[in-house]
Each structure stands twice: as C-alpha cells, then as structure tokens.
Image (spheres, rainbow, N blue to C red):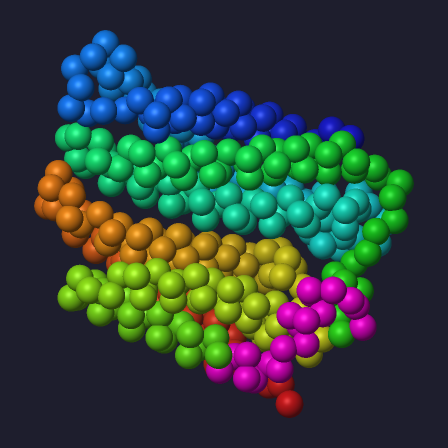
Amino acid sequence: MILHPSILALFISSLLISLMVLYSTAYGIQILRRWDIASGSELQLGLERRTYLVSTIVAYFLAFQLVSLFMFIYTADSICHLFVGAMCAVGTLTVNQFGYPTLVLKIITFLLAGLWLILNHADNQGFDYPLIRTKYRLLVVMAPIILAETTLQGIYFLGLRPDIITSCCGSLFSPASRGIATEVINAPPLPMLTVFYLSTSVTFASGLWFYLRGRGGALFAALSVVQFVVALTAVISVISLYVYQMPSHHCPFCILQCEYYYVGYPIYIAILTAATTGMGAGWLSHYRGIASLREALPGLQRNLTLTALVSLALMAAISAAYTLLTSFTLR
C-alpha cells in the first residue's frame, strides 16, 4: 500500500462511514419493525428520542460520502506519477482490477446518498416523521453497497505498488481497446452530440414545466436518469474531444487537470447534481398527499427543481462553449 495523505483520509473516512451506516441500518430495521407514532409506549418514546440524533449523524456522514467521490478521483489523478505508464487517473485505476469497480460504486452511492439526504430533509419538515420508514428502507438498501465500496476501495489501495507498469488513457480509451469504454467512444460523435443537446433540452423543459405547474414530477425524475447516462456518454465520446481539441483523445479524467483549467469538475458536478436533485424532486411527488408535508413539500420540490435546472444549464453552457464556439471541428 502506498502511504499518501489522501489515501489514508479516504481509507479512514470510508471505514467510519461504513460503521455508521451499519449501526444506523440496525437501528433502521428496528424502526421498520416497531415504529408506531400513535403509540405512547416506552419503546416508541425511545425510538423518537434517538431518531433525530441518528438521522443527523448519518446525514453528515453521507454528505462526506458525496465529497469522497471527487476526493477519490483527485487522489487517483494526483498519484499517477508514481506508476510507470500512467498519465492521469486512468493509469492509477488500472493498476489492479479493483479501481474501476470502486469508482462505479462510488458514483452509485453518490446518487443514493443524495436521495437519502433529500428524503431526510423532507422528513424533518413533518412533525410526525412521515418519511421515516421510507428513508430507513433506502438506508437498508444502501448499506451493502457502501460496505462493498469500502471493501473494494480498501483492496484497491492495498494493492497499489509503485513498481507496477500500468496503461495510459490513450490505450484504454481508444478505438482499438475492448470493453465498455470502446462501445462508448465509438458512438458517432455528431449524432451523440445531437442526442446530448436534445436530451438536455427535453429534461430542462420537463423540469421547467414541473417548476411552474407542479405537475409531471415522475416524468422529470425519469428524464433526469436518462440525461445522466447520456451526459456521461457524451462527455467521453465527443465533448472531451472538443476540450482537448484532438480527434482521438477520449479520456474522461484529463479534463480534470490544470492544463484544461479543471473544467471537468464543474461538468461532472453539474451532471451529478442535476441527476440527484431531478430524481429527488420527482420522487417527493409521491408524498404530497401526506398532511404534515402538504405545505412544506412544494417549496422543497421547487428548490430542488431549480437546482437541477441551473445544473443542466451550466452543463449545457460549458459544453456549448467548447463544441459550438471553438474552431475545432469533427469530420
């Protein structure tokens, strides 16, 4: 294992998050089995006293879980010089077979943690904890995924050796490579760009309708999921080419480096934020009929939807600045 401050911080924080999630899941199972807001039993009173404290602590840990995704990518990118053949995070993540699975799980837990934080905030708006069972069901689902992420990340970090020869992004994200990366980068650039802008426009229009009319939440949530996949695919297959102004450089990580003004960070943050808040705003529509949330929920949904709209607009503006306003063209 390479001793690096960022690696140690990620290792320790992931372990603490997993332990807290395990404890909270055990408590959540008790909530799912025994919670009865109409009861005045000693057990119910004990659950009510503990639930706010536990939920608050979990919220802080899951907020750091959001940050850990970018911390993981930054760490992988910053230590690439330690490995022969690596030029960015791609090389670091391919040092062993656990790098990319860890990254995928971190993206999944980012989205799930964001949704849990939204549910928890909505639940706190009601005097009777109306969403307590829903948010703890989600936590039970998240627990094995977070544990798997922590385990894979630990194995990945322990397997890092500076004498390992790895691959650069040019060999992995090239037409000659094999796997999912090849399928993504081989997407026709101009049609993919058209799909990206069309998907962004349709999702934005759906969100704007939901923001103004308060209807169509489920559609907006579904489109946010589709937009998330389309946006990530577009970044790798075509938008990155315009950033690098090279027709064959598809790396999704080099755009995070200073040579390209760290433009990848606002792009990825906007993509993830739009997906999380869009899904969250739509999901909350299912609970509008709850009496204790009837007044608070519409305002929360509007704020989430506005955040998603701003994120979509930011993502589209940055992409347009490179794909439409530069002299570089793809034939």
Q: Residue at x 54, y 59 (%)?
A: 264
Point out residue 305 in the picture as x, y percentages from the top left corner.
Answer: 27, 58
Q: Nearer the viewer, residue 316 or 78?
A: 316
Q: Is residue 141 left or right of residue 302?
A: right
Residue 124 percent location from the top left of the image: 23, 33
Position of residue 181 measured from the top left corner of the image (x, y, whole percent) = 69, 65
* Residue extending furthest toward the bottom: 331
Q: Looking at this view, is 187 or 267 the one in front? A: 187
Residue that appears at 48% across and 28% down: 21
Q: Is residue 191 magenta?
A: yes
User: Which quadrant does the N terminus fall into?
Assistant: top right
Residue at image x 58%, y 33%? 147
- Residue 149, above or below 190: above
Q: Can residue 175 be seen in the rendering of this structure?
A: yes
Q: Which residue is nearer to you in this view: 27 or 114? A: 27
The quadrant in which the C terminus is found is: bottom right
Q: Nearer the viewer, residue 212 or 44?
A: 44
With 143 as the anchor, is 121 left or right in this view? left
In the image, residue 129 above or below residue 194: above
The x and y percentages for residue 299 are 17, 50
Q: Quadrant of residue 120?
A: top left
Residue 67 visible from this viewpoint: no
Side of 264 relative to 28 (left or right)? right
Q: Quadrant of residue 42?
A: top left
**Magenta residues?**
176-194
